[in-house]
Amino acid sequence: MASERGTDRPFSVQLDDHDVAHIRFEPNADLRIEHITEIMRAVDDIRDGRHVPVMVHMEHVRTADREARNAAARADTGSAVTLITDSPIGRMIGNFYMLVNKPRTPTKMFTSEQDAFRWIHGLRK
Amino acid sequence: MVSGNKSAFDPLERASQKEDLVMATELTPGSQSHTQSPARERLIQRRLEEFEQAIVDLAAGKLDEVPEMTGEDEKLDAIAAGLAMLREELRATTVSKHYLADVLDAIPDLLVVLDSDGTILELNRSAWVMLDYEKGDLIGRQVSELFASDVPAIGPSQLAKLRETGPTPNMPAKLSTKNGEEVPVRLSLSVMPQYYELERKTRIVLVARDITEQSRTQEELVRANQDLERLVSTLEYRTHEMDLISEMGEVLQSCHTTDEAFSVLGSFLPRIFPTHRGAVCMTTSSGNVLQASATWNDFPEDMRQRIFAPDQCWALRRGRVHLTTMSPDGSAVRCHHVDPAFEGSYMCIPMMAQSEELGLLHLRTIDPAGEFDGAKMRVAHTIAEHIALALANITLRESLRHKSIRDPLTGLFNRRYLEETMERELHRATRADGTLGVIMLDIDHFKDFNDRFGHEAGDSVLRQVSKAITDETRGEDIACRIGGEEFAVVLPDASLEETYQRADSLRKAIFGLTLEYQQQHLPTVKVSAGVAAAPLHGKDFESLLNAADRALYRAKSEGRDRVVKASDT
């Protein structure tokens, strides 16, 4: 059973059986820097010092302000980051994040988890 | 494995391949078809107009308003969200740009961005303020126009070197303000990193620091250092001077005679007054005239020989220092004892001791244009005091010495001196295996003479007899009055026979004296004498004197008015 960290914040962080950290948001989440800080702390808690891939499920993200995006881009989030979104807003945010904020960790956007897992698997090889 | 470095993972690069981007507005399977209802078409049209206006506003720098997400359509809301993020980035960039501009303007150094051919592209506030221009006056001009001299070379080879070696070390240069004033600076050049090359053109950054204050401070430091060196040099010279004066004073105090003292002055004064020549002029015993007793540094010979009266010197007349200089501040009144042909400055300092005028110290500059500064005048005054004190002490000691070894009545040496001298002469004669003669001489019937003519007449006779003894003796002979009417004469290197002959000559000379007292003729006096000689009659003072004394006694007992030789021992 994957470990789970749940709080009253608009996100949750889980580690699945494949050692991938999943970040999920509540509907209409407006992300700010303090959320990113909490998310990073939660990821650190569950990975126990290991570098694990992170899968960010962005379907319910409505906005992510500049500070939040910069903080996420600077963070040492994991070995790779996948942005999962099928919503136009999620895609807009994801594109901005990659183009403007230029994350340190290799990041790719997918419309499905399966595609994302395949990419992660390819990296692990 | 993704390494994470820029070359392996550049979002911009990857994005250009469109592998990672997923367009927000692309049609996804199951999304609405192109067939739009009129209401939707109106919605889309309205939103598109809003977006277009928002883009225009953003381009114009109006960063306050962007369309909100309405929730009417996801894709349209996505575009609104994108415009909102774009506004955020533009606002942050604008703030950053203003912030950077403020930072650059706050830098006190001149900062200029140049094109590869030296064209000024941008400059900070300090630059145009320092050069007294308006900012717009300088944009587009050549950087060489800013320099008064030492224009840094800007060309392809210099740029290549800059890229290779990095920023140049600080170089001195001079900038020229709008008014033509020169500003000394230290400047450096560097090439901006190629990552920031815009329009594929090279950008050079010139940074210059105004070192006017630093240069001024440095010049002041140099001047202060020079002043300090001069001060130290002066101090060292003064210390050396004082050491010489102190040493001279000590040596003078150890002198026994005035001749010794003048010799010492001749040695020290040229070193104390190297740029002056001079003379120590002493008043004769009569007090009527002065003459140079010591001179130095080629004091004119004619002046050295010259004798002058005290009133020919203004310093002696006034009882104070008299200074005559070539400067307008100096006195134009010259002393009469100074040769008229002399050109230059001189000073005369009276030498006084115990209210007595001993003479004067005369100093004159070797260089006709030379002057006496305050320090030198003080030194001269101190020297004059030292000399006066030393000479007064020597004179006093000489007087005391004279009184201690001379008979006050006749001026001949006294018995004490006889004892000192006899010992010395006997030792000398013994070492040289030579002889020493002694005459013991006594005036015959002198008591009767005194009783008949009085003691004052008797004293007069004693003085006249003493003079005769002095006249008849050689310079190396020692004539003494050893008591009453008794005299002794020591004759170095004289044999017994020679001593006898000399004594007899003396007897005859005294007998031949015409004695007078108070214009009255006195009877002639006769003397008896006994003679002895070393080593024949002894090698010590007592033996020799006793032998001569016994001979004198025989001369008296055998009839007086004769010379008798001491018996052989």
Image (tube, rainbow, N blue to C red):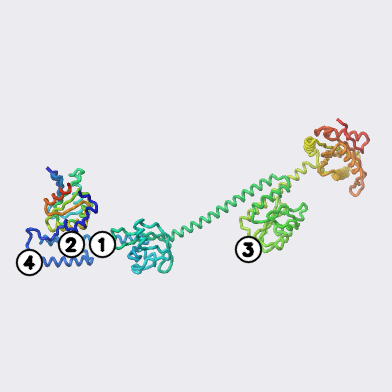
For the residues marked 4 and 1, what is the alpha-carbon distance in whole angstroms?
39 Å
| Residue A66 in view in this figure | no
Q: Nearer the viewer, residue A84 or B96?
A: A84
The answer to whether the residues at label 2 and label 1 have Cβ atoms under 8 Å apart is no
Q: Residue at x 90, y 49 (%)?
A: B519
Provide the secondary structure element on which disc 1 rests.
Answer: helix
Q: Which residue is mark 3?
A: B329
| Label 3 CA crowd tier, 10 Å (few <14, some 14–19, many 20+) | few
State which chain disc 2 sits on. Answer: B
Residue B100 position within the rendered picture, expressed as x and y whole percent measured from the top left: 30, 60
Q: Earlier in the sequence, mark 3 or mark 4?
A: 4
Residue B504 position within the rendered picture, expressed as x and y whole percent measured from the top left: 90, 40
Q: Residue at x 48, y 58 (%)?
A: B220
Residue B422 position within the rendered picture, expressed as x and y whole percent measured from the top left: 80, 37
For the residues marked 2 and 1, what is the alpha-carbon distance in whole angstroms?
16 Å
Q: Which residue is mark 1?
A: B94
For the residues marked 1 and 3, what is the alpha-carbon distance in whole angstroms?
76 Å
For the residues marked 2 and 4, what is the alpha-carbon distance in whole angstroms?
24 Å
Q: Which amino acid is tagged 3?
A: Asp
Q: Which residue is mark 2?
A: B83
Q: Which residue is mark 4?
A: B39
